[in-house]
Every structure is written in structure tokens, then in C-alpha cells.
Amino acid sequence: MKAGIVVFPGTNRERDMAIALRGVTGRAPAMIWHRDTDLPDLDLVVLAGGFSYGDYLRCGAMAAHAPIMAAVRRFAEAGGHILGVCNGFQILTETGLLPGALLRNAALRFLSQDCHLRVERNDTPFTRRWQVGDVFRTPMAHGDGNYIADDATIHALEDEGRVAFRYARPDGRVDAGDRQTNPNGSVNAIAGVFSANLRICGMMPHPEDLVDPLMGGEDGKPLFEGLVEALVR
């Protein structure tokens, strides 16, 4: 699998993501600068976490207009696979490649803590190494992770099975009103969503930060292993 990570000014999780990808592919991913206007031959584009352009204006809003994003849109339109994590998820919503928006956390403060996610479907490249209902631990680190969309969009996401992950208790119970298990206040406890063709996934927590025992666990590794299985040529 050939993967590339887009790097904007303020991106700070590209090395974490590179470690995760190199661990499952055996090769270093390409680092793609925001001023580039084309992508190399890739199977997967990753928009990593951080604070692109210092989060000025609105998280992800400026990155959405970077020169490289025209190429990312073309890649998506051609059926390419894209993973956006944290700020990457925010960028995907700002470009319209994923629906909804990420607002300030319900507590109006930055959250840096572990959370648990429940897997909502397992027939996608991003989730194929889990079973439906599996729960895994993953770190979160964001100030604007409160997922919201209009009622029609939420209904469509639910009806079409496009919710990828939900914030949950370790036993899998979901309670959107419980700030211990849904700390940023996301509607329906949504932590990640898919595009209509299931080839784009955005999520707020950081699976790349739990891919090795030295990191404290390998809870996030199945996501990357599944991508390799699905996309290796």
C-alpha cells in the first residue's frame, strides 16, 4: 500500500501517523507539502492532526483552500481512499468531502485524554479488522471535536450506516448525554463518519497513537492493518 501524508503549517501528528503506516506497510509514507499541486501515485491519502495554519479563522478552514487540496479532491472523485484524523477530519468537513462540522467541545476547553470508541460497521477498509460492536481505547486531543450536522444529514448518516465510530463506555454502552463517555458533546456520540462511497473516513481521536506496546497498547493498529489488507496491490 502506497500512502501519503499531507503536511500543512501547524500539522504536528505527521510523524506519529508515519510510524503507524510504516509499521504495517514496511515503507515510509510520502510526505506531501501543502503547496504541492499534485499527488504521487498513492492508494491512501492521510490528513493528520495538529493545528493547520494555527487554527486561525476556523479549524481546517484555511487548509481546505491550500493548493494541494485540489489534488486531494481529484483523488477523492477518482475513488481514492482518504483518512482524516482530528484536524484532518476538520479539514475534510471544511472541504465538503465529509458532511457536518466540528464545533467547540461542550466544556469549552481542550481535551487531552483517553476515550473508548465503538465500531459501528466492519465492511469498510478502515474497520474490517474489527467486529461490529467492538470497543477500543484511543487518545483524543482537541478543542473543537463536537460533531454536529443538521437533522437531515444526521438522519442520512444513521440510515445509510455512515457512522464509523461512536464514543462509548468500555462495555460498549453509548450515552450521548454522558460527558464522561461523550466528552466533547458530539451529536449521537459520533466520533467518526464515512463518505457515501465508504472510501473517506474522518475521526477525531488518534488511533495512530496506540499502535505499539511501547506506546501503551496496540488498540489503534487494526485500522491500519485493515487498510493494508484492502488496498495493497
Image (cartoon, rainbow, N blue to C red):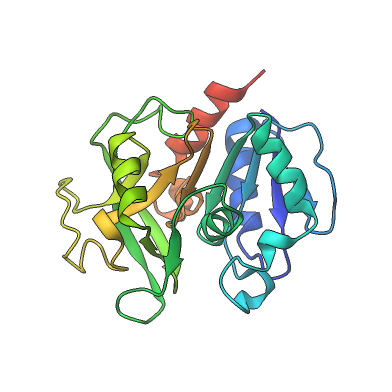
Task: Name the outermost residue toward the top.
Answer: 233
108, 231: nearer the viewer: 108
Q: Is residue 7 visible?
A: yes
User: Does 54 sit left or right of 108 as displayed?
Assistant: right
| Residue 25 in picture, x, y percent from top left | 63, 31
Please say if 224 is above or below 172: above
| Most foreground residue, 63 or 46 | 63
What is the quadrant of the N terminus in the image? top right
Q: Position of residue 221 (x, y in %)?
A: 46, 39
**Quadrant where the C terminus lies?**
top right
**Viewed as shown, does residue 187 lie left or right of 71?**
left
Q: Is residue 13 above or below residue 57?
A: above
From the top left corner, tell me how far across and down residue 203 is, in percent: 45, 51
Query: Looking at the image, which is closer to me, 173 or 24?
Result: 173
Residue 73 appears in which quarter of the rendering?
A: top right
Residue situated furthest front in the rendering: 152
Is residue 40 shown above or below 59? above
Q: Residue at x 25, y 54 (%)?
A: 188
Spot occupied by residue 158 in the image (x, y as percentages of width and height): 29, 41
The residue that appears at 71% across and 44% down in the rendered structure is 72
